[in-house]
Image (cartoon, helix red, strand yellow):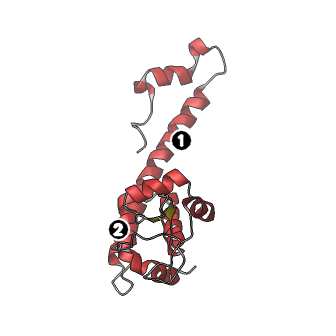
Amino acid sequence: MAFGQFVGAIRFRAPFPSRRKESATSKDWRFGRDMNISIGELSRRTGVKVPTIRYYEGAGLMPAPTRTEGKQRRYLETEISRLNFIRHARELGFEIQAIRELLALSTEPDRSCAEVDGIARRHMAEVERRIGQLVALRGELRRMVEACGHGRVGECRVIETLADHRQCAHEHGRIS
């Protein structure tokens, strides 16, 4: 699905209009579509696990679904596109708040994409920072492994270096 089609599919989803509290097997009054997609079916069609879908609902990324009289969640077809967008953004490492902002911005197709670009650029800078940390970490690990003489553990350079941070060639901390 092209992004323009995606935007058209979710344009009416945010801000999230409230749904009527009727049976989810009825036609949705706004769109004339059957609301027959269960949370399990939504999970199968998007590859997102059921607990994760519930988490996204709680985090405000997915609208609260209409429920049947038996309290089962029912979704619209358009929520498949929305959930795929969220899944892909998470796979790319975007934080929940950034995804929330991107979803809100995607509902305004005539607006400048400067804010979207800013969000993506900030995320890219964070990814570059993490890559730098990982490259330094790889170098330190390589140095430790190459110093190993394959002798006894009591004389192992890997163990010695891990036990005494002063033996590390680079300052490093936890990768965040």
Q: Residue furthest bottom?
A: 110
Above or below, 59 against 175 in this view is below
Above or below, 97 against 32 in this view is above
Residue 40: numbered disc:
none
Image coordinates for residue 13, horizontal then vertical, percent: 40, 75
Image coordinates for residue 87, horizontal then vertical, percent: 52, 62
Q: Residue furthest right?
A: 150
Which one is in front in this view, the residue at disc 1 or the one at disc 2? 2
Image coordinates for residue 85, horizontal then vertical, percent: 50, 68
Residue 39 seen in the figure: yes
The residue under the point 49% across, 45% down is 134
Above or below, 51 against 163 in this view is below
Q: Quadrant of residue 60?
A: bottom left
Residue 101: numbered disc:
2
Above or below, 42 against 13 in this view is above
Q: Which residue is mark 1?
A: 138
Secondary structure of the residue carrying tag 2 is helix
Secondary structure of the residue carrying tag 1 is helix
Q: Nearer the viewer, residue 119 or 88?
A: 88
Identity, as a three-letter code, of the amino acid under mark 1: Arg
The N terminus sits in image quarter: bottom right
Q: Nearer the viewer, residue 6 or 136?
A: 6
Q: Nearer the viewer, residue 160 or 62?
A: 62
Q: Nearer the viewer, residue 52 or 71?
A: 71
Mark 2 neighbour density, 10 Å: few (under 14) some (14–19) many (20 or more) = some
Mark 1 neighbour density, 10 Å: few (under 14) some (14–19) many (20 or more) = few
Sequence order check, earlier mark of 1 and 2: 2
The C terminus sits in image quarter: top left
